[in-house]
Image: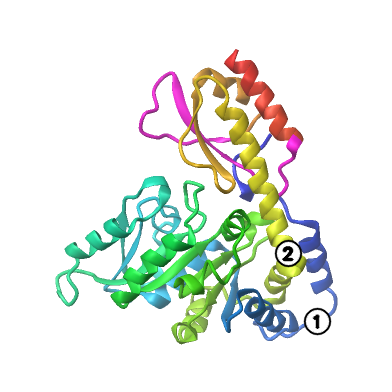
Amino acid sequence: MDFTSDNAWGVAPEIMAALAEANRGSAASYGADDATARLQAVMADLFEHEVEVFPVATGTAANALALACLTPPWGAVFCHELAHAHIDECGAPEFFADGAKFVPIAGENGKLEPDSFKSAFRLLPLGNVHNVQPSTLTLTQSTECGTLYSLDEIRALTDIAHSRDIAVHMDGARFANAVAALDVSPAEITWKSGIDVMSFGATKNGAMAAEAVIFFDKHLARDFAFRRKRGGHLFSKMRFLSAQLEAYLKDGLWLRLAAHANAMARELAEGLGAMPGVDIHFPVQANEIFVRMPVSMSKGLKEAGARFHPWPMVGDNDQARTVRLVTSFQTEAEAVAEFLAHARAAAG
């Protein structure tokens, strides 16, 4: 009953097998290997578009290096106030962009809204030497609240950004969960909706350690190879990153893994939502659930061996507090049923 994070779980067998195969013999170093060359073609086919693909090992590196390519040191990166790149990356994007500034914007259910995005420009006049200059918009899909941007919502925001010559980045650490839940093509939800660059995540969904920065506008990638090297993410044995990503995408594995995690989250949310004293904060659309439950229930679950993180939110009190539950590709239906049984027992 481990619902702490999708990062807590292991490696999909298919990806582990690909790593073992990549370990046979020798291969050219620093990305000149066959697996990395194939990955470029695989990603182009997946997204129905010519792309530049750069494997890295962590989501923080993917976000930080991508945003640094898009944002000058005097630039502003617009984001939701809960965005991972803003809150949870220890200033890495600002560091690699040599001082660029995040401009956080509030929004319901973890999503930016067009009106609030437009309002943010009023404080940052273009050409005013006294303020940072609007440069980049970053959207998280799925969001930090486990919700999803629809195609129309993405397009509304990217249209505003592009009308002001602002590039758009997508943090796709849980991109697979979004694609599986929305049942759309990767192309539709990215470049066809106005995304210029994305951080493509795999680690949370079955990889050992593999992410990729994908440029749909190749012109924007002109400095990335140097930034990746300077940032310590040009792996000498790049084949081990590329092999993970290639196996991840083969035969739709990535979507099957994500669909399972999403299904386990829905089952968990439906069971909890029927219990007295339980309040689920946001629509459960991917694989994260934020639920306020009686303290007695949380204590009973912990005593039964369940693992999850407290997640303090406005409205919590001594009787009821919020926790975050995250399901993964390896979450078992039996674990969900056991968790719900203990929750019901604690609820009386």
Residue 133 against residue 265 in the figure, above or below? below
Residue 132, picture quadrant:
bottom left
SS of the residue under disc 1: loop
Q: Which mark is residue 26?
A: 1
**Residue 277 appears in view:** yes
Image x and y of residue 308, in percent: 58, 35
Image x and y of residue 88, in percent: 44, 53
**Residue 304 appears in view:** no
Whether residue 314 appears in magenta in the rendering, the answer is yes
Q: In this view, does 108 lie to the left or right of 146?
A: left
Disc 1: CA contacts within 10 A as few (<14), some (14-19) or many (>=20): few
Residue 244 against residue 12 in the figure, above or below? below
Residue at 66% across, 47% down: 261
Whether residue 229 appears in magenta in the rendering, the answer is no
What range is drawn magenta here?
A: 308-333
Q: Marks 1 and 2, how far apart in space? A: 28 Å
Residue at 57% across, 49% down: 286
Q: Nearer the viewer, mark 1 or mark 2?
A: 2
Image quarter in which the N terminus is found: top right
| Pick the front one: 243 or 256 | 256
> Mark 1 or mark 2, which has the lower sequence index?
1
Residue that label 2 marks:
252
Image x and y of residue 82, in percent: 39, 50
* Colouring chosen for the image of the structure: rainbow
Residue reaching furthest to the top = 348
What's the amino acid at mark 1?
Ser
